[in-house]
Image: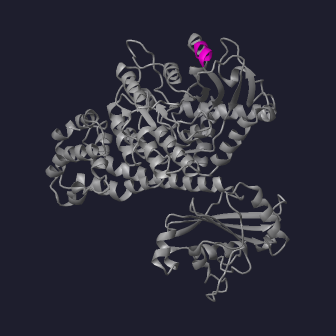
Amino acid sequence: MPRKDKTDCAVFRHLNNLEYTYEWDAYCNIPEVNEILSHAAKNGSGNPGYPDGIYANKEKRLLILVEIKPSLSQHASKDGRKNPEKYAVDGILHYLSCFLKDNIENPSTVTYFSCWKIIGVAVSGDIYDEYNHRISNFILSGDSITEQKGLNDILSETDYLMLFDNIDEEQIVSNITTSSKKINKWLRSVDSQKRPVLLSALMICLFEIKGTQNDFKNGYNSWSPETIVNNIPKTIKKVLSIEKLPEEKINVLLAELAFMEHEQDLNNLTILKDILNELSDTVIPFFERKSNYDIIGKFYEEFLKYAGVANVKKGIVLTPRHIATLFTELIDIKINDVFLDPACGTGSFLIAAMNKLVTVIENSDVQNKEEKIKSIKTRHLIGFEKNQTMYSLAISNMLFRGDGKSQIYNTDFFSQEAADALKELEQKGICPTIGFVNPPYGGKDSADNPTKKEIQFLTGMLDKVSRYGLIIAPLSTYFKDDSIRNNILKKHTLRYVINMPKDLFMPNAATNTAIAVFETHKPHGNQEVIFFDLKDDGYVLSKSKGRTDVYNKWPRIKNELLNKLAKPNEFSDGVNMVKTTLKAGDEWLIQAHAATDYSGLGDNAFLKSVKEYMIFKAKQDLDLLDKDLDEVTLLEVISNYYGGDMNE
């Protein structure tokens, strides 16, 4: 692969050391890419023009263009970035602009690239000299080109794909937050706990079944409110019957909707039409993307905010998307695996498991891939959820994912009904091999609180899956109930325990949690356990969006975590990562096995702690802990608080 100069060669050596499926080159064998570049000359002549490097993965629809300059002074112009022949950033922006749909003449080419992920990378200077090079990353998203300001390196193929997932998530969060505000406003007179059920029902009514006409979707804009209300149960029954959902499950959803008959405000001339239009135009299109984001779960969280309900008090702690995805990467997953979630909520683990299995199949050499993927969605996902509202949300969530709903049961995992369901599935040759669970938190298994404890969910799940079981639960799960934990290790092997960031479930719950990974039906014996303290996942908490990976840090943090878990002898430091054997009664937490870390102690650390406490104490006494103050105002408040004390 001939390059123009030494700098290009260095950059391409670096690229070749990263994980890419195919080779980088100066040209591309995809006709549609070459069609656009055939008149992309930097001088505007309309002649062919090519960036210094091109990477294309047709299967994953990923295109990366690289422009390289040997000197830092050639990184970007100062006159509007309009000198593509002399500067790396200007050049890459020129090439990316050629892929904007308004600049593509052929309509079929516009359609071809509508689902592609297109990235531009500008590199200047010596990439192997830490202080003598610059890298800028740009993405083409929709009708615009956006610079990724916090990203100053070249990523691997996987990380670039995850970058787009993160951007998708940001867009989903923003749109759903906006939509939920609108819908909550329209439904302000409806019981806050009923709003998500109505949302789920309306989404099912908008679902289009291939080969079947949806009269509701095609006609609701011309119907009266009374006609819409009367047709909601009929349409749900029709859609779910065609989708082969058992009648008893359909009846559960219809029972949840009985309240509609008594809601006078639903007869308002526009409310239901406004909501249906909002869902159709803004929300449903997101389901067409292959994402692990729990869209319905996010709506539910937003609705609870407006209801003033604390999720944690109700035992409802929805699983963050990146954690659901992490579960699928902590273990090896095979094509024939069957997933079980004993407390599936709105279905986030089932969504992640389904997408992972689809990816495994797509990347395999198995025959009849489409048929196998269809089988996954109908036979390889099992969920139990006793909360009727959550169950109805899970059904609609999975419906728009392409299936996966037929083996979700509205019953308690510990009931005889659940045992019978699992036995019936076993008779059909469907036996769970992997279990994922984020159980209800704060269960007591008592008369006052009949919800089972987290450790009981773990025990029940491990006994029913043949390969792996993973749980995320409060830290107390890992040091209480010694006898239950000892009995678990008599049957199953504990492989990893990963302490998660303390604000993982914020703003909905302030709960310290950890993930535990078990290999099932293999007594633990003297096996060593790896304990890891993941203090930071890169996510940032904001008022409007909750916790998001705004700086795209999670991909690297996750890869580092997986790499260290795979090489414990190399990375165990006795403080943040410990590999050790367990004795009977030992706690399953890194705090019980790690050495004390004194490296951060010193005068500066002590003074910092004192200052932080003084700020906390002042804000607590002034009832300002939940207030978002700017730095100047906070300084004035703190100064006045301690100034007043000192004058007394």
Q: Quadrant of residue 53?
A: bottom right
Q: Nearer the viewer, residue 448 or 381?
A: 381
Tell how many labels.
0
Q: Is residue 508 above or below residue 117?
A: above
User: Residue at (65%, 43%) from the top-left corner?
Assistant: 558
Q: Quadrant of residue 18?
A: bottom right
Q: Is residue 309 above or below residue 106?
A: above
Q: Is residue 372 above or below residue 252?
A: below
Residue range in magenta is: 486-491
- Would residue 72 be found to the left or right of residue 479 on screen? right
- Would residue 310 be found to the left or right of residue 217 on screen? right
Q: Nearer the viewer, residue 235 or 72?
A: 235
The location of residue 32, given as percent across then percent down, is 56, 74
The location of residue 386, given as percent across then percent down, is 36, 28
The location of residue 215, given as percent across then percent down, is 21, 56
User: Residue at (76%, 34%) from the top-left corner?
Assistant: 605
The location of residue 171, given as percent across then percent down, is 48, 55
405 within the magenta span: no
487 within the magenta span: yes
Q: Is residue 538 above or below residue 428?
A: below
Can residue 540 be seen by looking at this rendering?
yes
- Would residue 54 be found to the left or right of residue 16 on screen? left
- Extreme residue toward the bottom, this view: 45
Can residue 310 be seen by looking at this rendering?
no
Q: Quadrant of the C terminus?
A: top right
